[in-house]
Image: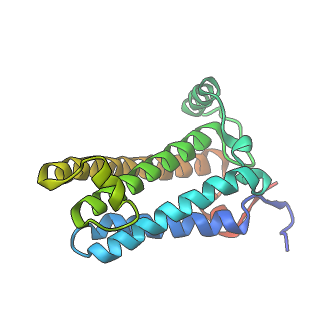
Amino acid sequence: MENKGEIKVWDLFVRVFHWTLVVGFFTAYLTEDEMLGLHVWAGYLVFSLVVLRIVWGVVGSIHARFGDFVYGPGEVVRYVKQVITFRAPRHIGHNPAGGAMIVLLLMSLVLVSLSGMVLYGAENQTGLLGNIAAALGVTGEQGAEALEEVHEFFANLTLILVVIHVSGVLFESLLHGENLVRAMFTGRKRA
């Protein structure tokens, strides 16, 4: 049931994906070596969610599709300049900067997940990508250390992107007088 003056923007899949990804990423980020089993399963969850989101970005509802929110670099830069001068137009779906952030987050999450799976395979000769680690010749302590550095780099990059994303959401909420966090729970925004 839609409230008067509001429209449905975010479908159930996008909302469940978003909040499950938040839980999965932070579970993986905070557990690391202390709870390796939980860390690995949270990483598999994150990777699975990202794959599903990529598929949903092609076949999902209108505002979930990449075609609705992926803009060229020029448009993203233009929009960021408008934000800086407090003249950015409101968008029903993702704005150009938000769309660019989604693409960056998805790419970073793919890279942190894949590097983690290869690292896990290299260290334990097991897991989904254990054979790839062996085929790449990533063996021994030095190989595992190099992979761990790559994995940690992308995990920390993702965390930085998340902080920028949340800051952008809060700024846009203030700029346009709209609670975007609430919208990601309810799926509705002001018409």
From the top left corner, tell me how far across and down residue 61 is, in percent. 78, 57
Residue at image point 55% right, 68% down:
19
With 156 as the anchor, is 141 left or right in this view? Answer: left
Could you say which is closer to the camera, residue 99 or residue 40?
40
Of all residues, the one furthest to the left in this rendering is: 141
**Colour logic:** rainbow
Could you say which is closer to the camera, residue 149 or residue 26?
149
From the top left corner, tell me how far across and down residue 18 is, in percent. 57, 63
Up-down relation of residue 31 to residue 98 (above or below)? below
With 109 as the anchor, is 76 left or right in this view? Answer: right
From the top left corner, tell me how far across and down residue 53 is, in percent. 62, 57
Tell me where residue 3 sits by quadrant: bottom right
Could you say which is closer to the camera, residue 79 or residue 55?
55
Count of picture labels: 0
Residue at image point 13% right, 49% down:
142
Could you say which is closer to the camera, residue 178 or residue 166?
166
The quadrant the N terminus occupies is bottom right
**Quick check: can you spot residue 102?**
yes
